[in-house]
Image (spheres, rainbow, N blue to C red):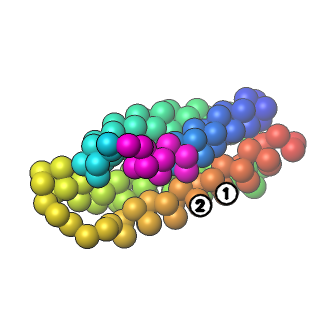
Amino acid sequence: MSEAAGAVTFVWLGMVLAISFLEAPLKFRAPGVTIRIGLGIGRLVFRALNLVESILAATVTVLVAVDGAPARDLSWTAALLVLLVGQLAVVRPRLNRRSDRVLAGEDLPRSRGHLVYIAFEAAKVVTLIGLGVTLLAR
């Protein structure tokens, strides 16, 4: 089971790296993509990513729990869940409220909330690597 959990973990890692650290910043550099268009696209993409992440988190949690994993695997899994729940319950709603205002036409200064989201993503990347390595090193 640890191999399956490790595989799911690394698929999740690939998705976070590809979307958060490649697609998200690049879309704003494409010709003709305004802040409003980029935000609209970003909301759709991140809503889908977060849904898939929730499914992957549930899958990893079940696989780790059923496997009778050692404490280190449980710790990495718990840390990952805390990060994901924090993003979905605290950071994303604030970003959504702000992007609603921008999409409604308000001219707002750059958001520091995105820096918080990026920090969570970076922490999630480290945690996914840690969990994946420990699962596959058994």
Q: What residue type is labelled 1?
A: Val
- Disc 1 from disc 2: Cα separation: 5 Å
In the rendered image, the vertical position of residue 126 relative to residue 6, given as above or below? below
Point out residue 2 in the picture as x, y percentages from the top left corner: 77, 35
Magenta span dominant secondary structure: helix
- Which residue appears at 33% of the width and 44% of the height? 33
The label shown at residue 126 is: 1
- Which residue appears at 24% of the width and 54% of the height? 99
Point out residue 115 in the picture as x, y percentages from the top left corner: 44, 66
Query: How many callouts does the rendering have?
Result: 2
Q: Does the magenta stretch include residue 116?
A: no
Where residue 9 sits, quadrant-wise, is: top right
58 sits left or right of 115 in the view: right
The label shown at residue 123 is: 2
What's the magenta region? 21-31
Q: Is residue 54 at all visible to an observer of this figure?
A: no
60 sits left or right of 25 in the view: right
97 sits left or right of 89 in the view: left
